[in-house]
Image: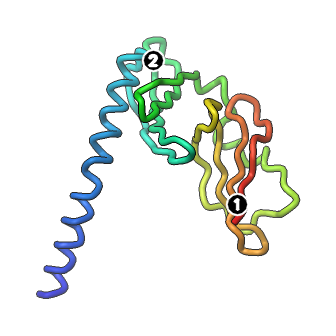
Amino acid sequence: MIAIIILWQVISIYQTAMSPVKKEMEHAAEIAKQETNLMTVDQISTYNGTNAYIIVQGTNEENEEMVVWVDENKEVVLTRAEDGIPKEEVLNYLQTDREPKEIISVTLAMEKNTPLWEIKFKDSNNQYNFHYIKYDNGEYFQRIIF
């Protein structure tokens, strides 16, 4: 009985903590729809780098897949998905002197007003690597290791 009460409290605390994030993501999706004529929203994610962004992916009136980055100031950067490197091909652009031991994630990002792909991985020395490549052409942008 005590375990059930503790579990219930943990779930309640988590939902309370995530409520503002969900609201902000929903608000960003509405901004993306209004500013870019998105008709559907297929995926919403967040990126917290130098600035925080909510990334909204969906389709427009012409049924084109679009990617919209909405920053903290509600400013919008829009691109067609076909103008970027597909997620499935991102790892092909990982050019590093260290072989990835474990790929953690491949997500969209934004730094210095440049749409990016962020590849998080562990190298052979168990160091975390953040490798950033430009969304539009796969060129190297930066790498952070710690």
Tag 2's secondary structure? strand
Residue beneath label 1, please? 129
What amino acid does circle 2 point to?
Asn
Q: Which residue is drawn at 35% across and 39% down?
A: 25
Is there CB contact under 8 Å for labels 2 and 1? no
Q: Nearer the viewer, residue 41 or 117?
A: 117
The answer for how far apart the CA atoms under marks 2 and 1 are is 35 Å
The quarter in which the N terminus is drawn is bottom left
| Left-right relation of 90 to 69 | right
In which quadrant of the rendered image does the C terminus lie? bottom right
Residue drawn at point x = 71 percent, y = 70 percent = 127
Q: Residue furthest bottom?
A: 2
Which mark sits nearer the N-terminus, 2 or 1?
2
Residue 7 circle label: none
Task: Classify residue 24 by image quadrant.
Answer: top left
Eye-nearest disc, 2 or 1: 1
Amino acid type at circle 1 is: Asn
Locate residue 113: give its quadrant: top right
Report the number of discs: 2
Q: Where residue 43 sits in the image (x, y, percent)?
A: 43, 38
In the figure, is residue 26 to the left or right of 58?
Answer: left
Q: What element carries label 1?
A: strand
Please rate how many residues cluster around mark 2, counting C-alpha atoms within 10 Å: few if below 14, some from 14 to 19, many from 20: some
Q: Vertical placement of 94 versus 41: above or below?
A: below
Report the side of 99 relative to 21 (left or right).
right
Q: Quadrant of residue 112?
A: top right
Q: Residue 60 carries which label?
A: 2
Left or right placement of residue 141 versus residue 70 in this view: right
